[in-house]
Image (cartoon, rainbow, N blue to C red):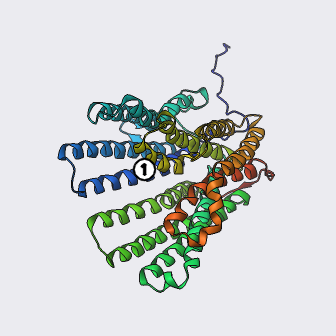
Amino acid sequence: MSEQKQDAVSLVDPGVPADQGLSSLGLLMQLGGSLFAAVATLGTFVTMLTRGGRGEDKLWILLILGMCVTRSMFHRMAGTELLYGKRTLEGSASPLGGVKRYIVIALAQSAILFMIMVGKFHVPFGIAIGPALGLALWPAVLAVLVALPRFRRFQTELPVAEDKGFEAASVLMTVLGTTGVLGTGLFLIVMLDAGGRMLSQGPGILIMLATILLVIRSGLHVQAGLSGLRETSVDRAVELANRYANFGVISSFCAAGALLLLLMSGAMNIAALAIVAGLCWMLMAWPMIIRRFYSERQFADLMQGDQANLHRRAPDAGLSGLGWLLFAHAMMSAAMLIPQLVVTNGAMSRKMFEAMSMFGGGAGVRSLWWSAGLVVLQAWAGFELIRMSSTHRIIGTVFSIVAIVVSVYLTWPVLQQLKFIGRMGPEGVMMFIPMAIQLVIPISTLILVNRNIAPTARARFKTPA
């Protein structure tokens, strides 16, 4: 009897889920692609409706915005293929195929944008290279990650995590929901502090009601996320996630409707209508993503009935999802910081830097290298959590403590203005929202990486009688 030589089975690394946390990356890429596509589409409509300027220059700007929309749509499609795959005439395509297409499209868009800035608008090389490098950073990093052996093994099929990726999704929902609670809650406090002046007018009442709806929506968001972190049965977690998704869609239309009525009471135009539509698009993006994620994976188990696979807690307890969130946020911050580090002077660039620093953790009056060092440390902590190394808890804790201290130091001049928050308008409060994001992420990381994990429990969906 001859022995047959068989290839060794490619086992999953210990401590990580079967899909290496790629379901969390898919959710984040869907969210990022939807938001960026909404912003780029809104910019396209506003540019088309804006009068003045040379017609040829406006066409070039529309071309740039069109490339941004295309890149964002490929970004979202890459996340969708990671989660749900893609069917072709030959069968199922590679789950990483969408990511590879996005990498090619994004790098090409960055190069074309650089050539347009230098060749058409005659922007100096030193200034044009900053935005181009910032745009090329994320696809270049994805290209490196996809080439790693731990992800290259999924060229033909991406397995489903032991817990269907629900706990990692709950981590994302908890962190993002807490950010929403702080942002909308702070805005509501300012409106209530304005008192009779705000509520004596019809538009003020509409904005107040819309803000209350968004606060409730964020609260349901956090509740659904926390339920997924502590429930041993997935039924309750899925129920709360679907409740948040349903209320999120309804609140998006209500908030957009309130804003539309507010605009109709004044000077209504097509540009204002486009802004309302873009806002509704952005508010609906995440609830729709969450609804499909939970519904499709729940439906698959319901269809299999008693033959469905047993659910059990993933070995990472959802920390790989936190790692992808840290890593993706670090890359976005780095993309915003690179132009600021390349161009450090000039009156025209100062306003652009102020806008970028709100989203990229800019240092304001402090040195930008503080923020750059913090971004590197966050990316390192995220990568260690993705691969669940033996030092992931130590590095995550160090990042959290350092990030809290550095963030307070960088934003201390702005934090001192909190004592005058009652006299600030809505525009002044908006600058506190990015600061809330900077503090929520390290605090959440500190809690999540050091929490006591309950023993692994098995659960399955209820089969209808």
- Which residue, given by chain and number where applicable, does mark 1 sit on? 36
Q: Residue at x 40, y 74 (%)?
A: 257
Q: Amino acid at mark 1?
A: Phe
For residue 151, which quarter of the picture? top right
Q: Secondary structure at mark 1?
A: helix
Left or right: residue 443 versus residue 301 is: right
Q: Position of residue 37 (x, y in %)?
A: 39, 50
Q: Residue at x 50, y 30 (%)?
A: 143
On screen, residue 205 above or below 314: below
Q: Is residue 134 visible?
A: yes
Considering depth in this image, is 228 or 45 the residue closer to the camera?
45
Q: Residue at x 48, y 60 (%)?
A: 288
Q: Position of residue 198 (x, y in %)?
A: 49, 81
The quarter of the rendered structure image containing the C terminus is bottom right
Q: Position of residue 141 (x, y in %)?
A: 53, 32
Q: Position of residue 380 (x, y in %)?
A: 66, 35
On screen, residue 405 above or below 184: above
On screen, residue 132 above or below 218: above
